[in-house]
Image (spheres, rainbow, N blue to C red):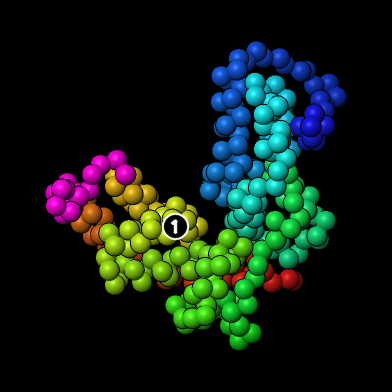
Amino acid sequence: MEDYFNKYRLEPQQGEILRTIEINHAEIMALNKMIMFLKFECTDPEAGLYAGSASLNSLLGKVLEIHPFRESQQEFLMTPNPRIAGIVMDQLERADLLERTSSARRSNELKRIIMEAMIYPYAYDEQLMQREYYEPLLPDSGVQTGEQWIEQIVGIMYKEPYVQQIHSKWGRLPLAIRNLLLLIDYDTELQMNGLLTALDNFDMRRQSEQLITALQDAGLRQEAVLIEELNLQRTLEQDRDAAGNLTEVFAAKLQTAERMIQLDEHSQLYECMYEYAEQAMQSWRQE
């Protein structure tokens, strides 16, 4: 395990002066948590670009070597982790969209090296690091624009047998497809049932956080912040009284949020989705 911790150790450059600092157990654990958050929890695209940094991995390896609970972490870190694998694949897709590059243009060996660096210190598992490109959701041969692709998705996503098949493959679908499905579903729920019911339904499906990141990825950052704040308010306070009615305080906040959504970015939702869909299509095409 010691060799694994040292996998990305950077040797000092010629003439470089090494500096030594003293840190206690609490500081080591805080530093470890900070690095792990940056690598695996932060959804900002810039964080994804930095997640496989050699200098960051080198620092993390040193922190893990002196971690007060080093031995207890060994088995956990060296067991393939499907959740972490999914996060890393999402980060790589976000980076591709941000940089207008395509993973299809990378050799399998280069993709493996990149993903190994991004998933470190967790174990790399080839089988876990694969997407499932569900054929009915991929752009048909005649699809040329993001708008056409979204029309195709809307035409099947609420029909059987696609509903059950999409649900069963959800975690393996490419990030862009999951984001588009979430955004279409969100707008449908919002228009048919209102904001509160839409959020309740996303909560029930455990997709609230995914919806927020989908809004962020599509460029609707103000609406993402608004939904995040509203969800937080619902968590921190009782939004219903003993009779099951909305409290006056929460009802006022909900009304304000609905007004802001309808008057603000939401009117641009589909335009943003079309652009996002076209970026995704381009990133999957080889030159």
Query: At label 1, which amino acid type do we have?
Result: Gln
- Residue 208 position in % (x across, y down): 41, 55
Quadrant in which the C terminus appears: bottom right
| 160 to the left or right of 88 | left
Residue nearest the viewer, comparing 18 with 1:
1
Residue displayed at 37% across by 49% down:
228
**Residue 191 sits inside the magenta stretch:** no
Quadrant in which the N terminus appears: top right
Image-quadrant location for residue 177: bottom right
- Counting the numbered discs, the total is 1
Residue displayed at 31% across by 49% down:
230
Looking at the image, can residue 7 be seen? yes
Residue denoted by label 1: 207
- Residue 199 position in % (x across, y down): 33, 58
- Secondary structure mostly seen in magenta is loop
| 274 to the left or right of 250 | right
Image-quadrant location for residue 192: bottom left
| 86 to the left or right of 209 | right
- Label 1: element kind: loop
Residue displayed at 57% across by 31% down:
33
In the image, farthest residue toward the bottom: 142
Residue displayed at 65% across by 13% down:
22
**Residue 243 sits inside the magenta stretch:** yes
Query: Which residues are the magenta region?
Result: 235-252
- Residue 225 position in % (x across, y down): 38, 50
- Residue 235 position in % (x across, y down): 32, 44
In the image, farthest residue toward the right: 14
Image-quadrant location for residue 144: bottom right
